[in-house]
Image (cartoon, rainbow, N blue to C red):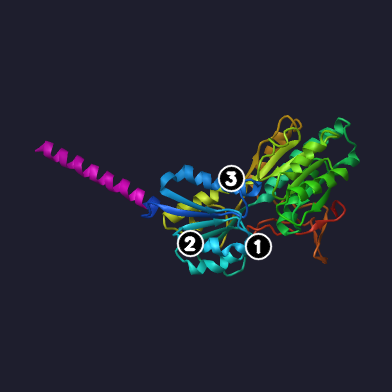
Amino acid sequence: MKRVYIITALTCLVIMAGFIVSFRLLNLSGGKEHLTVGFIYDNDESTPYTYNFSLASDALKREYGDRVTIESCSNVLDDEMEEPLRELAEKGCDIIFFNGYSELVRKLAPEYPDTQFCQTSYMDMSGQSVPANYHTFKGEAYQGRYVSGIAAGVKIRQMILDGTISEDEAVVGFVAAFPTSEVISGYTAYLMGVRSVVSQTVMHVCYTGTWSSYAQEKSAAQHLIDEGCIVISQHTDTIGPAIACEEASEERPVYYVGYNQSMSEVAPGTSLITSRICWEPYVLGAVEAVFMDKDIESVVTGRIHGTDISAGFEKGWVEMDDLNMQAAAPGTEDAMEDAIERFKRGNGDFVFRGNYTGVNPDDPSDTIDLRKGYIENENTSYPLFHYILTDIITVDDM
């Protein structure tokens, strides 16, 4: 009889364990064993911005394997978004990610309530009414820009100490697409990082008027080099500026700081460091939420503003990539790490702070005094700092 009781008890335990395992699996997936995930890219993987974003798709494949089917469309211009968006939604995509800046995504989302639409942040969504299935997200890029500026600053300091340049030759250049707040915020944070090491550094900015033109970006970089800039960075989408630095370095020292994708292969002698927004944490978290049939904002961790999320180094949403020890100055890694740890401990309020006055390029009567400080991404994932710092930032005409 005891043996019967023991066998019965063991059988019950096995059944209970099976229920527990089944419950956990069910809870993990929300009853969904498979998802179709869409990606719409504004360009293709030959450009750094889209390549960097596509890494999230690769991470999704590694994480879920056959449990996800990935549908993608490349080279989709913002004003041509409607057709591929509808095509993917009508294919049954459970969630679609976009790295373009089209307003069509938000407008069309209500027509497909069973699909979650996740777009890289392209404007300030705070206070705006958005569909429940529409989400925006972005890593706090200014943090990586500031740290990459430190790498440039340590290099400039070394060049001054070595006598390669004089103190008044501490000039950096920036190839920028458009004077949007996202671009201005990034290059201002970059310069603040440089000046945290070499306080007399000034910057020249050259706009190309396009996000992606190899010829124009390379030409802008060459212009800045001709103006005496000794480190070039960019917020555009081709390898043109990196190539310009590598070619110019044959005549005199010129270094390069990247964004989105390492340029050490195309500029091995001049590339110092690259900062990138890491899209993987959001994409993986959002897909996990859809598997579990939960709100994305209840699963993804970060600074949450309604259906908009941002984060920085503390959540792995911003990363530094490929420090080139052959070109970087001694002490660069330690200086960068100190700043990264500072970001992880706080809100980055030390970046946009100092005895500076900024002027809105669209409205000269709109100014800001940075002695009071400015906190980026405080209420939205989209960068809002849009002031040109007087005396230390000059916008050049090509």
Near mark 1 (Cα within 10 A), the count class, few <14, some 14-19 or many ≥20, is: some
Residue 89: which numbered mark, if any? Answer: 2
Foreground mark, 1 or 2?
2
Q: Position of residue 74 (x, y in %)?
A: 58, 53
Name the residue furthest left.
1
Q: Looking at this view, is 52 or 5 the one in front? A: 52
Of the image marks 1 and 2, the number of the one nearer the N terminus? 2
Residue linked to disc 3? 316
Quadrant of image for the N terminus: top left
Q: Position of residue 318 (x, y in %)?
A: 63, 46
* Residue found 47% across the figure and 59% down from its top: 295
Q: Looking at this view, is 214 or 146 the one in front? A: 214
Q: Which residues are magenta?
A: 1-26
Please name the amino acid that badge 3 sits on.
Gly
Please name the amino acid that badge 1 sits on.
Met
Instruction: Quote the CA–CA distance across marks 3 and 2.
Output: 30 Å
Q: Above or below — where is 36 with respect to 82?
A: above
Residue linked to disc 1? 123
Q: Secondary structure at mark 3?
A: loop
Q: Position of residue 49 (x, y in %)?
A: 64, 49
Q: Secondary structure at mark 1?
A: loop
